[in-house]
Image: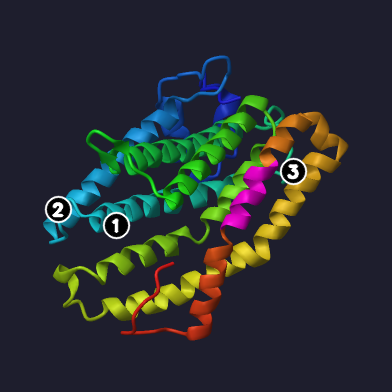
Amino acid sequence: MCMPNNGNSNTAKMEPIPFVLRPWLFLYRATPRLRLPGTDVNFGFALLCAVAFSVLRLSFRLLLYSLGWPVGSLDTYFASACMASFCHSSLILPGLGATLLSQKYVPSGRLEPSPKWYKDATCSLMMFCTGYMIYDSVLGYIVETWQIGVGPVLTADDWTYVGHHIMTSLYMISSLWNGAGHMSAMMLIFNGEFSAPLMNPHLFMEKALDQDCWKGIEWLPKAFAYNEQLFSLIYLVCRVVVSPFVISYVSYDLLLTKRGRKDVPLWLSILWMPMCWGVQLGSIPWIMTCFDTLKRGPAVGAMHEEL
């Protein structure tokens, strides 16, 4: 589980490693090993990614300031967060796809029989995602909401996102700790992130349309309108068509098969179920809005509705 490469054997050199995963393996294996207490989970890469995303988000914020966005504005904070989130989803999706396609898909499958490169790729991708969750929770929901003398002030929606980040991280870490169930986590992340490369530009442009400094960009309303349509379509496919089948199969394999109950303790699978189905239920308001968006059609120049 999450072990670094400890040699340059001929066998390692002959491994048929997918090209898209080689940068992940290089970065993961080059990162100093830091175990979570009482586990064999290498948490060092997650912390490195959390720092990297924090620097990236602050850099995007400075870039927006230089382009005329208001300093200290919540819109600027949110837009820079969308840019960092776009980087996260765009980077992780090809890696998840290559990893999932390289092995037979078994939601409760074990890591141990897999090739060394596959184990390290799995750990790197899930620690990358965990690092993103840590960074976003700390910077987005503690630092940027902090009020002097009060502390972080969070809305109900903020608490929902923090809960999502915590549950997702626990799911990934516990699957690596258990040495099985990682495929279920990766498939859920892949489906959940699939619409994000369109969602983040949608949210970014939604804020950009309200900025005085970008009022003169003629193509922006049209780009927003058509991206909104495409995002809504992809989101509905992922959440209405694909997600129920993915989550149902994960639940079946973990809870109702002998192999699943053997490789993943039943108590752990039961704890994962609210994480699986909770995200699906939480997406219902977005689903309804996306249905309305497609029904309305591209509203170029019209007042847009925030998702």
- The answer to which image quadrant residue 123 occupies is top right
Q: Amino acid at mark 3?
A: Val
Q: Is residue 275 magenta?
A: yes
Residues 176 and 168: in front is: 168
Q: Is residue 110 above or below residue 106?
A: above
Precedes in sequence: disc 1 or disc 2: 2
**Residue 144: horizontal and vertical position, in percent?**
28, 43
Precedes in sequence: disc 3 or disc 1: 1
Q: Residues within 10 Å of mark 3 (few under 14, many from 20)?
A: some
Name the residue tied to disc 1.
79
From where the camera sits, is residue 109 visible?
Answer: no
- The dominant secondary structure in magenta is helix
Residues 194 and 147: in front is: 147
Q: Residue lying furthest front in this view?
A: 149
Q: Nearer the viewer, mark 1 or mark 2?
A: 2
Name the disc covering residue 106, or none: 3
Which stretch is magenta? Answer: 273-282
**Residue 138: horizontal and vertical position, in percent?**
36, 36
Name the residue tied to disc 2.
71
| Quadrant placement of the N terminus | top right
